[in-house]
Amino acid sequence: MGLPTDLNLDELKRRLREGDYLEISTGGGAYEVWAEPLGNPPAVYYEGEQHPLAQLDSIAHKILREMHAGEISCRWVEDD
């Protein structure tokens, strides 16, 4: 189940900041994106790398842009 096509930037950033995990599927595999605002240092994890939390806005923009272009598909990882 993918993300709704009307998902907006603020909702994406809010859910990541609140600890939700986003799974991104590409033609070559999948990886998860999440943020740890209370981590030391505060960070966002994207494409298997740790980035400063300040980059969350640009990462969220990139995710939405690639999703709308059909380059990736995304879904929220739900706890079972």
Image: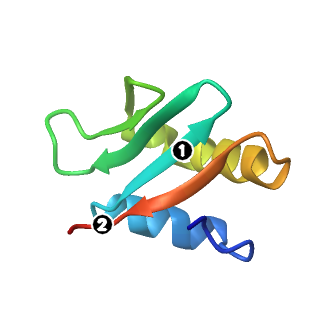
**On the rendered structure, is 49 left or right of 26?**
left
Spot occupied by residue 3 in the image (x, y as percentages of width and height): 60, 67
The residue sitting at 33% across, 62% down in the picture is: 20
**What separation in Å lies between label 2 and label 1 (alpha carbons)?**
18 Å
Question: How did the renderer colour the structure?
Answer: rainbow
Mark 2 closeness class: few <14, some 14–19, many ≥20 residues within 10 Å: few
Q: Which residue is mark 1?
A: 24
The x, y position of residue 71, in whole percent, is 77, 40
Q: Mark 1 Cα within 10 Å, few/some/many (few <14, many 20+)?
A: many
Residue 19 coordinates in the image, percent (x, y): 27, 60
Sequence order check, earlier mark of 2 and 1: 2
User: Can you give x and y, in whole percent of width and height, for residue 28 in the image?
Assistant: 61, 24
Secondary element type, mark 2: loop
Q: Residue at x 41, y 67 (%)?
A: 15
Residue bearing mark 2? 18
Amino acid type at mark 2: Glu
> Looking at the image, which residue sits at the far right?
69
Tell me whether circle 2 and circle 1 mark residues in contact (CB < 8 Å): no
Location of residue 26 (image quadrant): top right
Q: Residue at x 70, y 53 (%)?
A: 64
Task: Note whether 72 is above or below 4 in the view shown.
Answer: above
In the image, taking residue 9 as reference, residue 71 lies left or right, namely: right
Pick the front one: 28 or 58: 28
Residue flagged by tag 1: what amino acid is it?
Ile
Q: Residue shown at 26%/51% (left/top)?
A: 37
Q: Is 75 in front, or is 17?
A: 75
Assign a secondary structure to mark 1: strand
Quadrant holding the C terminus: bottom left
Tell me the quarter of the image containing the N terminus: bottom right
